[in-house]
Image: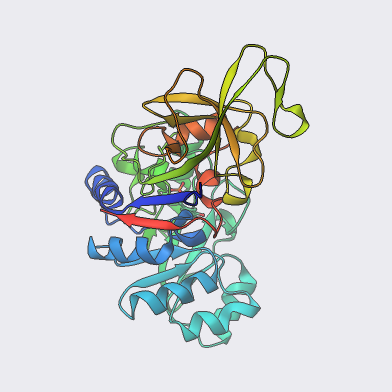
């Protein structure tokens, strides 16, 4: 029995609904973040659909991601590169008419001395990651179109740091009258009216992850990762399943071997707590996830080769799958490897 490969089904209709949900919730233009190949879903397909829904400004991390998007989307949309303008990528940025988000003095100098032009500026209000410290924020300069900062704890609505960052950003952005202000990522979109500023900048909630790392009733699942059962066997007491005897059989068990493994992006950390949706219910992953296959306890179920199992998606919420695997939805999505075909529906 040959099996279909593990497949990532991307519901573009659900993506569109999440986009409009965030637009309605914030009352602000939504500028989607489509870095890391659209969080693994396929940046071109995702951005094209979001453009059809009205999006005109996108964010990527790397200049090379922006170049791919520019080719696919044509000249119209604005594309910001969060990495900014360091020496090597200025040529790419200029050739593809991208806008760097400048985050330190050397980048501003680089950009201005290479001809300047439309760009953004990142102010660091808590993360100590990228951007100017508030007290070092530069004077306004020619070409500055966007000023932004990034929330450190947007997934914790009651964390007082959120408002401190909001107030710090509000104060520093007074320096740049007429420049578009961008503050909120996905979690920030849910913090309330005064966290919206001019445009919002969500990623994960567009793709079906909840703003607090758990399912949210306003956010629709977008990505569904499925695999096929390849073989079903009964295993008697005393035997083991998988590498390193990862699962010891203590009562007779029926095992379904499914065609998805860590080389598809099903992290090894899915075991021992991971579960998959099969035949209308959740069943545990048993033993170690291996490169190409994983084992599921299907005892008592009517399961046969060719049946489909869902690792996350419409039936098994991605945040719950991520929690079971000891990680976050972002990592589950961006871990899905190129050998997994993306199937677009909706
Ligand atoms: C990734 C990223 C975002 C999007 O964050 P989500 O939590 O996925 O909404 C927004 N802004 C910056 C600077 C980012 O790096």
Q: Residue at x 54, y 81 (%)?
A: 92
Residue closest to the eye, 245 or 30? 245
Residue closest to the eye, 154 or 328? 328
Q: Residue at x 38, y 56 (%)?
A: 343
Depicted 235 relative to depicted 200: above or below: above
Most extreme residue toward the top, as rendered?
251
Dividing the picture into quadrants, the one containing residue 138 is bottom right
Q: Residue at x 44, y 22 (%)?
A: 301
Depicted 211 relative to depicted 273: above or below: below
Depicted 154 relative to depicted 143: above or below: above
Where residue 323 sits: x, y (%)? 54, 30
Can residue 99 be seen in this snapshot? no
Q: Residue at x 41, y 79 (%)?
A: 71
| Horizontal arrangement in the rendering, residue 328 relative to residue 226 (left or right) | right
Where residue 203 sits: x, y (%)? 42, 51
Most extreme residue toward the front, as rendered?
1
Dividing the picture into quadrants, the one containing residue 252 is top right
Where residue 294 sits: x, y (%)? 60, 37
Can residue 292 be seen in this snapshot? yes
Where residue 196 sits: x, y (%)? 33, 47
């Amino acid at each position: 029995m040959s099996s279909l490969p593990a497949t990532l089904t991307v519901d573009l209709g659900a993506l569109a609904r999440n986009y409009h949900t965030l637009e309605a919730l914030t009352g602000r233009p939504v500028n989607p973040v489509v870095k890391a190949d659209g969080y693994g879903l396929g940046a071109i397909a995702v951005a094209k659909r979001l453009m059809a829904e009205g999006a005109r400004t996108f964010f990527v991390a790397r200049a090379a991601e922006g170049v791919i998007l520019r080719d696919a989307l044509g000249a119209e949309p604005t594309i910001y590169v969060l990495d900014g303008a360091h020496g090597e990528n200025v040529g790419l940025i200029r050739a593809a008419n991208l806008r760097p988000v400048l985050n330190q003095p050397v980048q501003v100098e680089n950009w201005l001395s290479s001809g300047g032009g439309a760009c953004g500026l990142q102010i660091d209000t808590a993360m100590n990651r990228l951007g100017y410290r508030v007290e070092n924020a530069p004077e306004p300069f020619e070409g500055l179109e966007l000023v932004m900062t990034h929330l450190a704890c947007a997934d914790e609505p009651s964390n007082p740091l959120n408002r401190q960052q909001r107030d710090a950003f509000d104060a520093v952005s007074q320096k740049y009258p007429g420049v578009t202000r961008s503050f909120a990522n996905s979690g920030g979109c849910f913090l309330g009216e005064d966290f919206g500023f001019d445009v919002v900048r969500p990623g994960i909630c567009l793709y079906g992850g909840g703003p607090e790392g758990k399912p949210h009733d306003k956010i629709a699942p977008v990505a569904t990762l499925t695999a096929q059962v390849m073989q079903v066997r009964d295993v008697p007491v005393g035997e083991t399943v998988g590498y390193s005897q990862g699962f010891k059989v203590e009562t007779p068990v029926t095992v379904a071997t499914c065609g998805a493994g860590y080389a598809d992006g099903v992290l090894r950390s899915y075991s021992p707590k991971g579960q998959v949706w099969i035949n209308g219910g959740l069943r545990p992953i048993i033993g170690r996830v291996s490169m190409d296959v994983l084992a599921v306890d299907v005892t008592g179920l009517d399961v046969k080769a060719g049946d489909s199992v869902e690792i996350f998606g419409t039936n098994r919420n991605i945040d719950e799958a991520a929690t079971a695997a000891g990680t976050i939805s972002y990592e589950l999505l961006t871990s899905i490897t190129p050998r997994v075909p993306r199937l677009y529906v909706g």
